[in-house]
Image: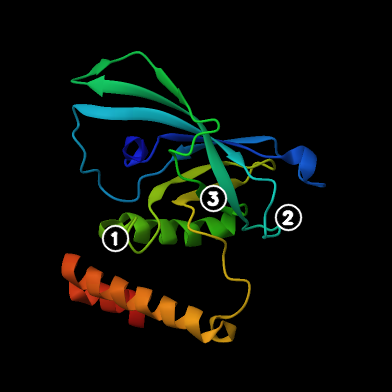
């Protein structure tokens, strides 16, 4: 089922556990996809889709932050096939209690001055890191923008959830964890060298 959303959905509907978060007043956000790279898909066959995601109330980040990261569960997907200009009937795929879809890491920019930084991160995923998505970096499900509760521009980067962020500096981690992470970084660098210009890999890991 994961292949259904290899191309990012055009819309993202995010439902928040506002009743469980004191001081949080956002019930739902409806965001639209922004493509940061030229499309390479077939113009005669596409999916116009909306992804509904529920945010996990348990979070290790500060939900009152201007740049929080939440874990999300895919609840439902709406897809419309477009073939040679003919629009098909909408289809709905519920994913409640399903282990077939990945959890998502939702990285937010809830202030306008933070949107550009998140967009630059999304551009890296959609560009240079695309060949190694799902291998050494999380799969990217798209970059989305919309309007916040105070009328400000906001953004969200949706990634495949690969675990919680580190809660302490890298140098303070145990030696076995640092060794494993070092091997992953070396493998990523080697793989990027094979699938891209080696100057691209050198830029990301040594600049």
State left or right for residue 32 relative to residue 183: right
Instruction: Using the image as rendered, state which of residue 185 and residue 38 is in the foreground.
Output: 185
Q: Quadrant of residue 30?
A: top right
Mark found first going from the N terminus, 1 or 2: 2
* Residue 1 versus residue 90 in the image, above or below: below
Q: Position of residue 167 (x, y in %)?
A: 63, 72
- Is 163 drawn above or below residue 103 in the view shown? below
Left-right relation of 185 to 166: left
Task: Tell me which corner region of the image, top left, top right, bottom left or bottom right, holds residue 82.
Answer: top left
Check disc 2 and report its element: helix, strand or loop: loop
The dot on residue 106 is: 3
Distance from Cα at disc 1 to Cα at disc 2: 33 Å
Whole-percent x and y of residue 28? 64, 35
Q: Residue at x 23, y 69 (%)?
A: 191
Is residue 203 or residue 38 the one in the foreground? 203
Q: Residue at x 25, y 58 (%)?
A: 131
Q: How many marks?
A: 3
**Residue with the mark numbered 1:** 132
Dot 1 and dot 2 residues touching (CB under 8 Å):
no
Residue at the farthest right position: 22
Badge nearest the viewer, 3 or 2? 3
Residue 161 makes an appearance in the image: yes
Does residue 207 appear in this view? no
Specify which label sits upstream in the sequence, 3 or 2.
2
Figure check: 143 above or below 132: above
Q: Which is more N-terminal, label 3 or label 1?
A: 3
Read off the residue under disc 2.
64
Tell me where residue 50 appears, x and y as whole percent.
Answer: 45, 30
Give the mark toward the camera: 1 or 2.
1
Could you classify mark 1 by the number of other residues whose Cα lies within 10 Å: few (under 14), some (14-19), or many (20 or more)?
some
For numbered disc 3, what is the local secondary structure?
A: strand
**Residue for point 40% across, 34% down:** 10
């Amino acid at each position: 089922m994961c292949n259904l959303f290899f191309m990012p959905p055009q819309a993202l509907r995010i439902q928040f556990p506002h009743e469980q978060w004191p001081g949080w007043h956002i019930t739902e956000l409806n965001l639209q996809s922004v493509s940061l790279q030229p499309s390479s898909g077939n113009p005669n066959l596409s999916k116009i889709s909306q992804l509904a995601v529920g945010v996990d109330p348990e979070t290790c980040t500060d939900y009152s932050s201007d740049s929080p990261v939440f874990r999300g569960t895919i609840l439902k997907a709406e897809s419309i096939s477009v073939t040679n200009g003919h629009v098909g009937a909408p289809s709905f795929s519920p994913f409640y209690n399903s282990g077939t879809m990945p959890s998502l890491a939702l990285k937010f920019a809830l202030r306008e001055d933070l949107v550009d930084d998140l967009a630059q991160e999304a551009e890296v995923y959609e560009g240079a890191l695309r060949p190694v998505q799902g291998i050494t970096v999380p799969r990217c499900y798209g970059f989305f923008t919309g309007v916040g509760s105070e009328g400000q521009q906001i953004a969200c980067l949706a990634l495949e959830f690969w675990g919680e962020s580190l809660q302490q500096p890298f140098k303070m981690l145990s030696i076995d964890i640092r060794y494993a992470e070092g091997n992953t970084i070396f493998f990523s660098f080697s793989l990027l060298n094979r699938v891209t210009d080696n100057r691209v890999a050198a830029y990301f890991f040594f600049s």
